[in-house]
Amino acid sequence: MSASPAAVLEAARTLLFVPGTRPDRFAKAAASGADLVVVDLEDAVAEADKETARHAVADWLGDAEAAEAAGGAGGVAVRFNAIGTEHHDADVAALAGRPGLHAVVVPMAQDPAGVAALVRRLGQDVPVVALVETAIGLHRVHDLAAVHGVRRLAFGALDLAADLGSDTADTTMLMARSTLVLASRVAGLPGPVDGTTTALDDPEAAAADARRARALGFTGKLCIHPSQVGPVNAAFRPSEDELAWAHRVLEAVLIGGVARVDGQMVDAPVIARARSLVALEGVST
């Protein structure tokens, strides 16, 4: 992996889950085109299979060739069991120091001190994603984002809705999503990662959710099927219309004077938006 684990995590648009009980799918997930593979030891693994899954993941990430292959695909994160659960310490003990472990996802993140303790156990070379999916976690999100070693926030709408006794509609979850965007910006983190889309047979549903999340300031999304990866990656890229507008703005600025594009005044925030869109396409201006 040429880029550092932190750089890969911060730039990731698609984070693809694969169950820790399916080692036969690990390499396939790494070859899916996802920016980051997240091997799951939490929700995707039944209680009776926790130890088996943990050993399978440890073996894969401890193998030098497998680690190199995984890193070449972008990187591998592991979603540990939540801090305070009986399986969390065993996850840390089994996986800390494995050469293929590029990041850790902390579910039900709500205790900044506990997350900080995990960072110390992992070492500073392993960045952490704080997955906010409880009312307490949302209440403490600014403190979570400020923990040294946390390099990204992620959002779990399903668990938060269960905790709140609400539904997961966009309007219901708007405040929570915007709070994560704000906390990320205040802490100097990249935009947060949106939660999963449960429609397995409708990749366009995941893409539509990603476009809505991007409009709020999110810069990535959790995926649960390889078919979601391509559409979600595309959703986080500027559209042709957006890029055309951005280039018109930047060309108008080069001409000088008070710029006007598409009947709208161009000022500093508009120019900054245009430059950010062009930068997302890999074009420096």
Image (cartoon, rainbow, N blue to C red):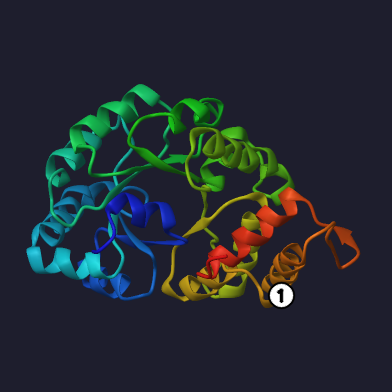
Q: Is residue 107 left or right of residue 240?
A: left
When the figure is inspected, residue 150 is found, relative to residue 76, above or below; the finding is above
Residue 75, percent from left and from top: 28, 61
Foreground residue, 119 or 48?
119
Q: Which quadrant does the C terminus fall into?
A: bottom right
Q: Is residue 230 left or right of residue 248?
A: left
Residue identifier under label 1: 244
In this view, the residue farthest toward the front is 256
Q: Residue at x 72, y 49 (%)?
A: 269
When the figure is inspected, residue 207 is found, relative to residue 267, above or below; the finding is below
Foreground residue, 175 or 142?
142
Q: Residue at x 78, y 51 (%)?
A: 267
Residue 216, percent from left and from top: 66, 50
Q: Residue at x 61, y 36 (%)?
A: 179
Q: Is residue 49 left or right of residue 175?
A: left
Q: How many marks?
A: 1
In this view, the residue farthest toward the right is 263
Residue 81, percent from left and from top: 30, 41
Secondary structure at numbered mark 1 = helix
Q: Quadrant of residue 274?
A: bottom right
Q: Is residue 46 visible?
A: no
Q: Is residue 30 visible?
A: yes
Q: Quadrant of residue 58?
A: bottom left
Q: Residue at x 57, y 52 (%)?
A: 218
Foreground residue, 108 or 122?
122
Foreground residue, 250 or 224?
250
Residue 79, percent from left and from top: 32, 48
Q: Quadrant of residue 1?
A: bottom left
In this view, the residue farthest toward the top is 113
The crowding category of the residue bearing disc 1, from other C-alpha atoms within 10 Å (few below 14, some 14 to 19, many at least 20), is some
Q: Amino acid at mark 1?
A: Ala
